[in-house]
Image: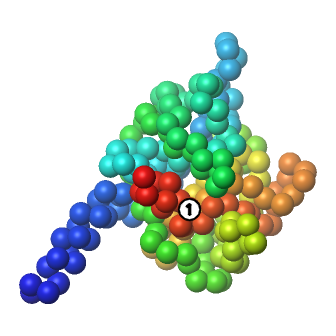
């Protein structure tokens, strides 16, 4: 018992620090609204809840936000606290309460089944898409055989088996604002470095 007790204690300390796998990840995926002047809030991107430095936070793509702009999730104000343009990740504080999504520890195997949900073209209801992990491109971005469209930037990519976050949609290769068959985005190591690496 003494041999495995330290491992158990480390596991129990680490997992709650970043959130357990949510039984219903769709509860943790929301629209990020952009506020400009007196205009009505405009759907900007997709965002998802997790833990950042032991506190609730929301994650989206860095190209969706600017520190001097106003944003909200579900009508509740959020504030940009960190932006990393190199890997296209932004962290926001505030917003509504939601179960934090668990971020996986490693890169998935090739052809691993994954799924995502986001709000393409500003739709109010989430669209769910499925696909496979295709590998990593020459720039270190995750390549996913996963359909995406404008408005889905920031959407988490989840393992189809256990619901853990294994990546995030940041862009696709389509030049027109249409559905695209492939998605690109930061893989798990980049997400973990930003969220848990300081």
Residue 56 appears in the picture as rendered? yes
78 or 146: nearer the eye? 78
Furthest residue in direction left, as rendered: 2
Nearer-the-camera pick, 31 or 71: 71
Instruction: Residue 18 in the image: state x and y as whole percent.
Output: 36, 57
Q: Position of residue 161 (x, y in %)?
A: 49, 76
Q: Nearer the viewer, residue 99 or 143?
A: 143
Residue in view at x 69 percent, y 43 percent: 63
Report which residue position mark 1 lands on. Answer: 190
Q: Position of residue 117 (x, y in %)?
A: 61, 56
Residue 156 drawn at (x, y percent)? 57, 58
Instruction: Say left or right for 14 vs 141.
Output: left
Give the residue at x 64% y 32%. 66
On screen, residue 73 above or below 101: above
In this rendering, the answer to whether 34 lies above or below 100 is: above
Displayed quadrant of residue 36: top right
């Amino acid at each position: 018992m003494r041999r495995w007790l330290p491992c158990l204690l480390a596991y129990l300390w680490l997992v709650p620090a970043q959130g357990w796998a949510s039984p219903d990840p769709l509860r943790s995926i929301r629209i990020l609204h952009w506020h400009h002047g007196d205009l009505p809030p405009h759907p900007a991107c997709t965002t998802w809840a997790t833990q950042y430095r032991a506190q609730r936070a929301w994650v989206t793509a860095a190209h969706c936000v600017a520190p001097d702009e106003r944003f909200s999730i579900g009508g509740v104000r959020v504030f940009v606290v960190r932006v990393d343009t190199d890997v296209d990740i932004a962290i926001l504080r505030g917003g509504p309460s939601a179960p934090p999504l668990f971020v996986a520890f490693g890169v998935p195997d090739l052809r691993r089944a994954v799924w995502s949900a986001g709000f393409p073209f500003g739709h109010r209801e989430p669209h769910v898409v499925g696909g496979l992990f295709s590998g990593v491109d020459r720039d270190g971005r995750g390549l996913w055989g996963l359909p995406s469209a404008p408005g889905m930037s920031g959407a988490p990519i989840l393992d189809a088996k256990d619901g853990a976050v294994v990546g995030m949609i940041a862009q696709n290769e389509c030049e027109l604002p249409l559905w695209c068959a492939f998605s690109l985005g930061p893989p798990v190591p980049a997400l973990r470095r930003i969220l848990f690496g300081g």
